Image: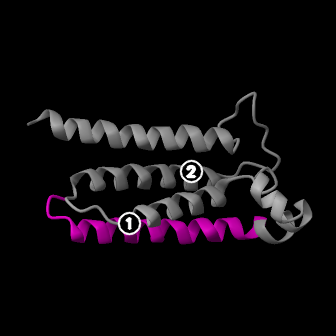
């Protein structure tokens, strides 16, 4: 019975580290030869990357404990919101296809810290709600 909690911890830790590595690589926060970031790296970018990864890991851990997990779509939205908060706006092909690079840098780039500041309490609220719904948590 003691291996099951360890498996949950390892699984959620793997999700957190995987989220950190994947999103950090594709946004250029973790320097790599494949992706070049076109805007400056800032401390809030790293904060939002770490927070998004930690919340994803905590969500997965709580989800594994719950008999009836809730909030999968909201968690996915929280990860996307976090990604948009620390991702390079003009490197995002979807955003670039929808808007011009000058519009992204003029209007969207200043809003990224606000998006991150909204996504953190959003994810924290989801974790709190999930914890209230779970007896084993």
Q: Which residues are magenta?
A: 109-137
Q: Which residue ends up furthest to the left in the rendered image?
A: 1
- What's the distance in space between the residues labelled 2 and 1, CA to CA? 21 Å
Dot 1 alpha-carbon crowd within 10 angstroms: few under 14, some 14 to 19, many 20 or more? some
Give the dominant element type of the magenta stretch: helix, strand or loop.
Answer: helix
Disc assigned to residue 49: 2
Residue 127 is a magenta residue: yes
Specify the quadrant that holds the C terminus.
bottom left
Instruction: Give the percent coordinates (x, y) of residue 22.
Output: 58, 39
Residue under the image location 82 percent in, 72 percent down? 107
Q: Is the residue 4 above or below the residue 101 in the image?
A: above
Q: Is the residue 71 above or below the residue 33 in the image?
A: below
Disc 1: which residue: 71
Q: Nearer the viewer, mark 2 or mark 1?
A: 1
- Does residue 85 appear in this view? yes
Q: Is the residue 7 above or below the residue 45 in the image?
A: above
Q: Which residue ends up furthest to the top in the rendered image?
A: 33
Element under label 1? loop
């Amino acid at each position: 019975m003691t291996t099951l909690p360890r498996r949950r911890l390892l699984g959620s830790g793997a999700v957190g580290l995987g989220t950190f590595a994947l999103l950090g690589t594709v946004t250029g926060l973790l320097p790599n030869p494949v992706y070049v970031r076109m805007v400056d790296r800032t401390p809030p970018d790293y904060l939002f990357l770490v927070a998004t990864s930690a919340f994803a890991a905590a969500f997965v851990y709580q989800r594994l404990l719950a008999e009836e997990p809730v909030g999968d779509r909201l968690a996915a939205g929280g990860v996307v919101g976090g990604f948009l908060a620390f991702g390079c706006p003009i490197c995002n092909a979807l955003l670039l296809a929808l808007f011009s690079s000058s519009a992204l840098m003029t209007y969207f780039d200043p809003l990224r810290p606000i998006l991150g500041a909204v996504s953190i309490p959003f994810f924290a609220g989801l974790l709190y709600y999930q914890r209230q719904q779970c007896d084993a948590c």
